[in-house]
Image (cartoon, grey):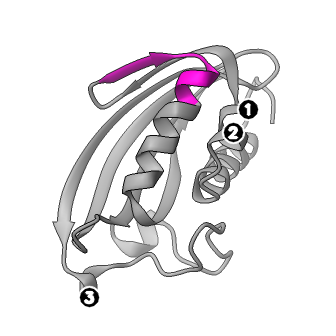
Amino acid sequence: PLPPFTRATATEKVRKAEDAWNGRDPERVSMAYTPDSLWRNRSTFLQGRPAIIDFLTRKWSQEDEYRLIKELWAFSDDRIAVRFAYEWRDRAGGWWRAYGNENWAFDEMGLMRERHASINDVSIAPEDRLFHWDRAAPRPVGHPGLTALGL
């Protein structure tokens, strides 16, 4: 979907981003961003596709069983705000749920030129996990989103 966004195209853009991130392929994910895209992810600042690929490669090498759900929060002509949560297991076997918000700005071709992410991690018990689908796959159509899960 290209700007200017409507509710339908913004929702579609968010779901496509979610599906790509759940695929855990840094090269593929990086192609959704401009070659010089600016990122703030927590306290990490980076720029450009090579830095994005490096960042995501490191991230997903440490987050086993990663599963993400994104939800549209707001949008304008060339901007989208999302809230999200993802669950993952650390190398020691502990489970985590990360909660966050992202602000995105797009160029006229629909590539993200800016991504600002604020994220908090909460330790969860294995039985408190809510995201259940095949690893490294898109969230199934029937799986509830954040609002339906009470997140």
Which residue is outermost to the top?
A: 36
SS class, disc 1: loop
- In the picture, the disc for residue 27 is 2
As shown in the figure, which amino acid type bears the numbered disc 3? Glu
Q: Is residue 19 in the magenta section?
A: no
Gap in angstroms between the C-alphas marked 2 and 1: 7 Å
Give the answer, above or below, for where 30 lies relative to 79. below
Please provide percent x and percent y for residue 134. Answer: 59, 79
Question: Bounds of the magenta span?
Answer: 44-52
Please indicate, yes or no, whether residue 105 appears anywhere in the rendered image.
Answer: no
Q: Are marks 3 and 1 in contact (CB under 8 Å)?
A: no
As shown in the figure, which amino acid type bears the numbered disc 2? Glu
Which residue is the site of mark 3? 127
Closer to the camera in the image, 70 or 23 = 23
Going 61% across and 70% down the picture, which residue do you hit?
A: 139
Of marks 3 and 1, which one's residue comes earlier in the chain?
1
Q: Is residue 46 in the magenta section?
A: yes
Give the answer, above or below, for where 85 lies relative to 1. below
Please provide percent x and percent y for residue 79. Answer: 59, 24
Which residue is the site of mark 1? 31
Please provide percent x and percent y for residue 35. Answer: 69, 16
